[in-house]
Amino acid sequence: MTAAALLTDLAGLPFAKGHGTGNDFVLVADPEARHELTAAHVAALCDRHQGIGGDGLIRAVRTRDVPEAAGLAAAHPEAEWFMDYRNSDGSIAEMCGNGVRVFVHFLLDQGLTELNDGEVLAVGTRAGLKRVTRSDNGYAVDMGTWRFTFPGKAAERALDSLVETGGIEAGRPGLSVDMGNPHTVVALSDAEELDRARLHDVPVVEPLPPHGTNVEYVLPAEPLVQEGVGRIRIRIHERGVGETQSCGTGACAAVVATRHWAGGVPAERWDVEVPGGVVAVKFLTGTEGEERVELSGPAAVVAHGVIG
C-alpha cells in the first residue's frame, strides 16, 4: 500500500509536530486508545517526502489502556500518561530522551495535564517510569540508572565493540551503554573525522547488543572539563531512523562513556553539543554503574494539523 493510501486510512486524525533540539516527532493525542497505528501507518506519517516527516511518532495514551504497561500502571498509578514511541520506520522503541520532553510539552499544549514550577510529572514508557520537571532550559528528565551492556569487557578494557562506519577508513573501538535503550559510543580524535562520518548508513557493530544499538560519535572538548562543566560534541546514528539532529539517551550514554574513559573526571554538569543544539546531562546519586542520570533541554510544538 502506498503512503498516500495509508494516510487516507487516517483521514481526520489530528496531529502536532514537535522537536527537542532538532529531534523531531509526529505527535498524536489518543486519550481513549482508539487509534491502533500500524508500523506501516507510522512509517507513512514520518515519511519526509510523502507524509508529515519526523524521526519518530509519539502517541499519548493513558497508561491503564496499554496492555504491556499493566505492571507499571499498577505500581505507579500516578503515571496517568504513557509515551507510546515508534521509530520512523514503524518499529517500537523503548524510550527517547528528547521525545519524553516533547511528550510532556505536548500534553501541556493539549490541556491534558498541568505542570507548575517545582512539580514533577510521572510518565510511563517502555523503559519504565520517567519523572519530568520544568528546568531553566526547558524540561529535566530523571532518565534512571545507566548500565554497561557488556560489564565485564567494559571494566577490563573500557571498550567492548568494534564499529565500522562509512566515511571512516578503519573500524573504531566502542563502549556500549544501556540507558533503558541500547547505545554504543565511539570516540574520535578530530572534528574532520567526526564531520566525515556517513551516518545515514547503518554502522556495523560487533558484537551487537541483543536488540541492536544506537551509535554515538564523540569529540571531547579540550580541555574536557572547564569551570566544573564538561563539554563534548556528538553525532548520532539512531536505530531504525538514520542520522538524527539529537538523541537524549544518546547524549547521556556519550557522557557516561566519556567520563569513564577520562577516569571518572568530576563535573557539575556536562553540556552536549548535538547538530540541533545543546542538552545538559548531570549525574545524580550512586556509584559508577548505579547512578541515575538527568537530561535537560528545550522542547517545542511547532505545528498542528489534521490528516487530510
Image (spheres, grey):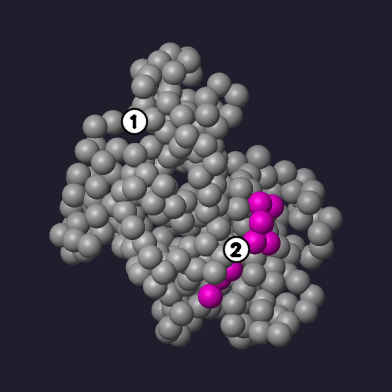
The numbered mark at residue 279 is 2
Which residue was labeled with disc 1? 37
Q: Is residue 51 left or right of residue 174?
A: left
Is 76 magenta? The answer is no
Q: Quadrant of residue 279?
A: bottom right
The residue sitting at 73% across, 82% down in the picture is 226
The residue sitting at 70% across, 80% down in the picture is 225
Q: Quadrant of residue 200?
A: top right
Q: Where does residue 102 sit, x and y in percent of width and height?
A: 47, 51
Question: Which amino acid, mark 1?
Answer: Leu
Q: Quadrant of residue 192?
A: bottom right
Magenta segment range? 273-282
- Residue 85: tell me if it is visible: no
The residue sitting at 55% across, 58% down in the picture is 298
Q: Is residue 129 left or right of residue 302?
A: left
Looking at the picture, does residue 160 appear above or below residue 91?
Answer: below
Q: Is residue 233 left or right of residue 160?
A: right
Q: Where does residue 199 sit, x and y in percent of width and height?
A: 67, 45
Mark 1 or 2 closer to N-term?
Answer: 1
Question: Tag 2: Cα neighbours inside 10 Å, few (<14), some, or many (≥20)?
Answer: many
Which residue is the extreme one toward the left? 74
Q: Is residue 70 left or right of residue 88?
A: left
79, 92: nearer the viewer: 79
Q: CA distance from mark 1 to mark 2?
A: 31 Å
Q: Do the residues bearing badges 1 and 2 touch, measured as CB atoms within 8 Å? A: no
Looking at the picture, does residue 39 appear above or below residue 4?
Answer: below
The numbered mark at residue 200 is none
Quadrant showing the N terminus:
top left
The residue sitting at 59% across, 82% down in the picture is 268
Magenta-drawn stretch, dominant element (helix, strand or loop): strand
Q: Where does residue 289 sit, x and y in percent of width and height?
A: 45, 77
Question: Which amino acid, mark 2?
Answer: Val
